[in-house]
Image: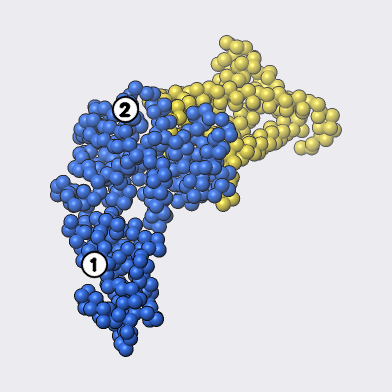
Chain colours: A blue, B yellow
Amino acid sequence: MIRLVGVSKVYASGDRPAVDGLSLDVAEGDIAVLVGPSGCGKTTTLKMINRLIEPSSGTIEVAGRDITSMSPSQLRRSIGYVIQQIGLFPHRTIAENIATVPRLLGWNAGRISRRVDELLEMVDLDLAMRTRYPAELSGGQRQRVGVARALAADPQVMLMDEPFGAVDPIARGRLQDLFLELQQRLRKTIVFVTHDIAEAIRLGDRIAILNVGGILEQYDTPADTLRQPANDFVVDFLGSERGLKRLSLLVIGTVPLEHGPVLAETATVDEARRVMADHGVDWIGVGGDGRLDGWVPAADLDGRHDLSGLSLRRFQSWLTVDASLIDALDVVVTSRTSVAAVFDGDRYLGMLTAEAIARAIVQ
Amino acid sequence: MNIDWEWIGTHFDDMWTATAEHLALTVLAVGVGLVVAMALSLVALRWRPAYAPITWFTGILYTIPSLALFTFFIPFFGLSLITAEIALVSYTLLILIRNIVAGIEGVPDAVVESARGMGMTERNLFLGVQLPLALPVIIAGIRIATVSTIGLVTVTALIGQGGYGVFILRGIRRQFFTETLTGTLLSVALAVVADLLLVAAERRATPWARRREAV
Ligand SMILES: Nc1ncnc2c1ncn2[C@@H]1O[C@H](COP(=O)(O)OP(=O)(O)O)[C@@H](O)[C@H]1O
Ligand SMILES: [Mg+2]
């Protein structure tokens, strides 16, 4: 969808290239994150894609067309653009800001108005915001307007330059969630710039790690980058806790679960003692048929014949199948039973152990 | 020095006529000044090296005494409106150009970048974004230009173009204090009223700035 071939940029005032022979392919519907230290040419690369900066050499294609075959303004109206400082128009209301590109494209008033409502809803903003001015909004709200404005004419391609860099960490987390949720629905082709490797890993389908001078060190999925960094620069840039960062990318569904020490109500206490011994635990779970009703400590079984009629304790440590392994690890190590029960909705799937997570890291 | 109330009471018609003349001379000067200043500012904004010579030239114009400037053009245009206006317009240029350029350049880079990034043409950008956002600074320039032009117009009476200067000059010639004072006070009053009207116009033209103050 976006293809850079041997793109270089040498600024008139610079002695060395800001971007040097960069080739990059971004598949349709993917988020490609450009990440790297300050001054490595991320912004320059992004701005060459919408011709705010003209490359010194190389070619860039968007949707199969050489971008120099269109006028810059025509090209830019077909590409959403979001920058860190947002650049909302202070003299225009939120609705007018969002309507910028549709107005340039000559949509009629009714269509624009409907689209503005739709977009405000999409980015979780109150319709009462329509008539406000940007100065009356919080930083997080302004950034949402920035995203809505970029999406206004439903462009296939979006360019985003550190869009969440200026907001506080909590607002940033929410914006990232919103962004991923929107992307699930909209499937835009996105080039996203950040200097924050954690953000890159969280958001990217692929991450391009750039070095100073605009040199591409590695272009891979986040999981593959973490598993097989191409060189020392990438290792350094990924920083510590590489294994843990990988865990944040994997979900429980990818790890084999154990049935665990769980028996039906009708099982005898003798059976239960045997199962507990097999698993090396001092408690037994009760359930069956995709149910997990609770657990009891071994001591509660004294003087009983089977597992019926016990007062069961609820599992405090349970997870849903789409949770990340990093969350799972947290639950497992803090749980009384050292395992976490995994559910898909109400259905019990099995037990996750610390060993299973450890195996997933080294895999 | 006594004030001759009877003279004042019998000259309201003259005062109205002078007010209309004074206002017309001022509006014409500031209006033409604005057009010329906008054109020169556009040149300077498009091609930055032009800015220094433009401000240098208009700065020199600003320092020439008004009497000298009138005198210089009288051989070409006589005691005419054109002579008067050439001088008056010249004095507005420096302040207007400075404020137009400062206003446009004061628009945040991020706003300009996002406007271009969304596919606005240079014309969309200038008329739809830069000019409205520069308005407070430009109107501040227009206020100064207007107030100082109102003061200067009293001198155009010398070349027979009417206005409050007629009272002032005649009062001096006839050593009739009441008439000179009337012309002076009317000129000051007109300047104050014009300034207040322009402040009101600025507030109307920039609702977003007002709303921000309220927050
Ligand atoms: N307009 C410019 N003129 C000259 N040099 C520039 C310009 N913009 C960026 N550079 C230089 O190009 C390099 C890359 O800059 P940039 O693309 O902004 O990096 P990043 O976004 O990764 O921080 C830097 O060394 C920077 O100083
Ligand atoms: Mg940058």
Q: For the residue marked with disc 1, what is the amino acid?
A: Ala
* Chain letter of the residue beneath label 1 in the structure image: A
Q: For the residue marked with disc 2, what is the amino acid?
A: Gly
User: Camera-side residue: B168 or A304?
Assistant: A304
Q: Earlier in the sequence, mark 1 or mark 2?
A: 2
Q: How many marks?
A: 2
Calculate the distance from the C-alpha at mark 1 to the C-alpha at mark 2: 48 Å
Q: Residue at x 60, y 16 (%)?
A: B83
The image quarter containing residue A339 is bottom left
Q: Quadrant of the N terminus of chain B?
A: top right
Most extreme residue toward the top is B76
Q: Work out whether residue A344 can be spotted.
A: yes
Q: Secondary structure at mark 1?
A: helix
Q: Residue at x 55, y 16 (%)?
A: B72
Disc assigned to residue A64: 2
Q: Work out whether residue A331 can be spotted.
A: no
User: Are callouts 1 and 2 both on one chain?
Assistant: yes
Could you tell me residue A242's position as x and y percent?
21, 56
Could you tell me residue A332's position as x and y percent?
28, 68
Label 1, residues with CA under 10 Å away: few <14, some 14-19, many ≥20: some
Could you tell me residue B34's position as x and y percent?
56, 26
Q: Identify the residue position indicated by label 1 in the image.
A: A354
Q: Residue at x 59, y 50 (%)?
A: B214
Q: Which mark is in front, 1 or 2? A: 1
